[in-house]
Image (tube, grey):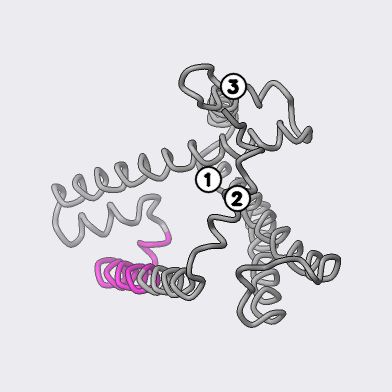
Amino acid sequence: MTSPSEQRPGLVRGLGAWDTALLTSGIVAGVLVIMVLYTIINLAYLRALPLADLAASPRIGESAAVALLGPRGGQLMALAVLLALIGGLSAGILSAARIDLPMAEDGVFFRSVARIHPTRRTPTVSLLAQGVWAVALSLIGTYGQMLGYVVLVVFLFHTATGVALFRLRRDRPDAARPYRVWGYPWVPGVFVLTSLLFVANTLVTSRSTP
């Protein structure tokens, strides 16, 4: 059985075979739906509570549900948020472990993390290491601090991804590109700038957060 590193070229070719127009329209439609839902939810929050109460509430969704639907509504909202977090956490665990694995196979991370379970074919060591690290972080900081760290690292990687696009276009101008970024260089340039602004904002706000 081939390793994940050996499977990556085939995966890239398979993704390249997708209809780029369909893929692009799907991404755009998904982003638009999320924007609409996010706007509706925030308008509901603003209708339920004044700005001062929203700023002071550690759980805005639950507080807004209590104001609109009573205590039972708040409990249902808290349950819905919890279930959503579990789903998001599951996706994060599965995907993050498979990022560490190829890094270890390529020699840029601890080699032991590349170990695959002999029968289940899962990155066991990577999953265990990720779990131990998550528990350690939960014991040494608050939720707000952890969220700030996550946002900082995520947008640093977003920035690096955008910069890598410019670097690859310069160093490998003739490389095969089944999908080309729309609006290059302006769209990725705005993306990199926006990511840097998020990084700067996180650094500034983290200093004022106890």
Magenta-highlighted residues: 34-55
The image quarter containing residue 53 is: bottom left
Amino acid tagged 2: Thr
Percent coordinates x, y for residue 11 in the rendering: 57, 49
- Quadrant of image for the N terminus: top right
Q: Main secondary structure of the magenta part?
A: helix
Q: Secondary structure at mark 3?
A: helix
Residue sitting at 29 percent across and 42 percent down?
A: 83
Tag nearer the camera, 2 or 1:
1
**How far across and down, in percent of the image, does residue 173 sit?**
81, 71
Q: CA distance from mark 3 to mark 1?
A: 28 Å
To which quarter of the image does residue 79 belong? top left
| Image quarter in which the C terminus is found | top right
Contact, mark 3 vs mark 2 (Cβ under 8 Å): no
Out of 188 and 207, give the one closest to the viewer. 188
Q: In the rendered structure, are the residues bearing label 3 and label 1 in contact, judged by CB atoms less than 8 Å apart?
A: no
Determine the secondary structure under disc 2.
loop
Q: How many marks?
A: 3
Residue 199 horizontal side relative to residue 27, left or right: right
The residue that mark 2 highlights is 209
Given the image, on which type of amino acid does mark 3 rest? Val
Q: Which residue is mark 3?
A: 125
The location of residue 18, given as percent across then percent down, is: 49, 64
